[in-house]
């Protein structure tokens, strides 16, 4: 068999494998999207059909207006007002907590990593590597000590407690990632600017930070995803239904033996949409940030 033919067959096999893997990975997302516009009376129909006979937006309307309609075999549709009425509050809580966690985690890790790579002090290298150990410890280890700290401070059942809890998870890895990235920025560029009369803050703001922007974006995405997707800390720290984030709030769609699958699928789509849009906007910076940190660190 000729070399060109073997190469084509190899490429065909690789692409076929990638197509199969992509279909397997994306099918749950496609099924959630289709189910979110499927009427309730078709939700559990056997055999299941990928394409619904009728498309409806009632599930999205229920989440956004606070009223849902679910199907009962004997009584038809019956209105329900809770918990969909809290969905927008849950969404707002997740946004506030995720953005707050990201800003604090990125700000602290950026300044800490810059000091690790530009200043000399005792235990400098040990602290840099030791910070990564905090991310290697399972998050459940931190939950109960953090809860015992939040109780006397009066922060339980409040959003700041979630921000502090998520920072304890995101900060160690964010610091290590930024440290690895700052090590790849030539210090000679800063020395030249200092010689020309620039202050340390001007050097950091005008030279170092723009060069480190891909790493900052990669760290931001990591911190945002951790805070947005967490369930454990929010489940333990929060009690009021109006203070819950999305990950815990949507679990209230389970009522005994009844599960409102339409609301669940619509909520899953709306929960995934912000992260999908964010990834599409910063994908190029994300790849550069993780790649640069991994290679140069």
Image: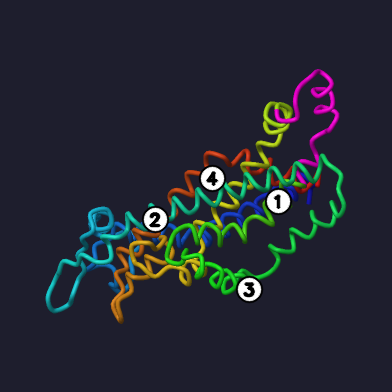
Q: Residue at x 81, y 47 (%)?
A: 297
Residue closest to the eye, 145 or 64? 145
| Residue assigned mark 3 | 141
Estimate how packed mark 4 is, as few (under 14), some (14 to 19) or many (20 or more) residues with alpha carbons within 10 Å.
some
Q: Which residues are magenta?
A: 180-201
Estimate how packed mark 1 is, as few (under 14), some (14 to 19) or many (20 or more) residues with alpha carbons within 10 Å.
many
SS at mark 1?
A: helix
Above-or-below relation of 140 to 111: below
The mark lying in front, picked from 4 and 1, is 1
Which comes before the other along the chain, label 2 or label 4?
A: 2
SS at mark 4?
A: helix
| Residue assigned mark 4 | 279
Which comes before the other along the chain, label 1 or label 2?
A: 1
Image coordinates for residue 135, horizontal then vertical, percent: 68, 62
Which comes before the other along the chain, label 3 or label 1?
A: 3
Q: Residue at x 57, y 55 (%)?
A: 19
Q: Is residue 258 magenta?
A: no
SS at mark 3?
A: helix
| Residue assigned mark 1 | 175
């Amino acid at each position: 068999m000729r070399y060109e033919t073997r190469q084509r067959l190899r490429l065909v096999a690789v692409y076929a494998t990638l197509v199969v893997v992509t279909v397997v990975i994306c099918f749950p997302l496609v099924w959630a999207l289709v189910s979110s516009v499927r009427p309730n009376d078709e939700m559990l129909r056997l055999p299941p059909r990928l394409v619904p006979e009728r498309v409806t937006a009632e599930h999205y309307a229920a989440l956004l207006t606070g009223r849902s309609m679910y199907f009962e075999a004997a009584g038809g549709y019956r209105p329900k007002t809770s918990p969909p009425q809290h969905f927008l509050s849950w969404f707002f809580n997740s946004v506030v907590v995720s953005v707050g966690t990201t800003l604090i985690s990125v700000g602290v890790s950026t300044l800490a990593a810059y000091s690790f790579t530009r200043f000399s002090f005792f235990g400098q290298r040990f602290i840099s590597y030791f910070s990564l150990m905090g991310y290697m410890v399972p998050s459940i280890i931190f939950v109960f000590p953090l809860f015992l700290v939040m109780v006397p401070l009066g922060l339980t059942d409040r959003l700041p407690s979630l921000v502090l809890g998520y920072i304890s998870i995101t900060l160690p890895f964010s610091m290590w990632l930024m440290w690895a990235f700052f090590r790849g920025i030539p210090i000679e560029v800063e020395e030249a600017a200092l010689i020309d009369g620039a202050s340390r803050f001007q050097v950091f703001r005008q030279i170092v930070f723009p060069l480190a922007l891909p790493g900052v974006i990669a760290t931001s995405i990591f911190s945002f995803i951790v805070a947005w997707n967490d369930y454990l800390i929010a489940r333990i720290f929060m009690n009021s239904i109006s203070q819950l984030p999305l990950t815990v709030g949507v679990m209230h769609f389970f009522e005994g033996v009844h599960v409102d699958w339409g609301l669940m699928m619509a909520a899953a789509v709306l929960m995934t949409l912000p992260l999908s849009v964010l990834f599409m906007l910063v994908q190029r910076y994300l790849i550069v940030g993780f790649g640069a940190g991994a290679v140069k660190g």
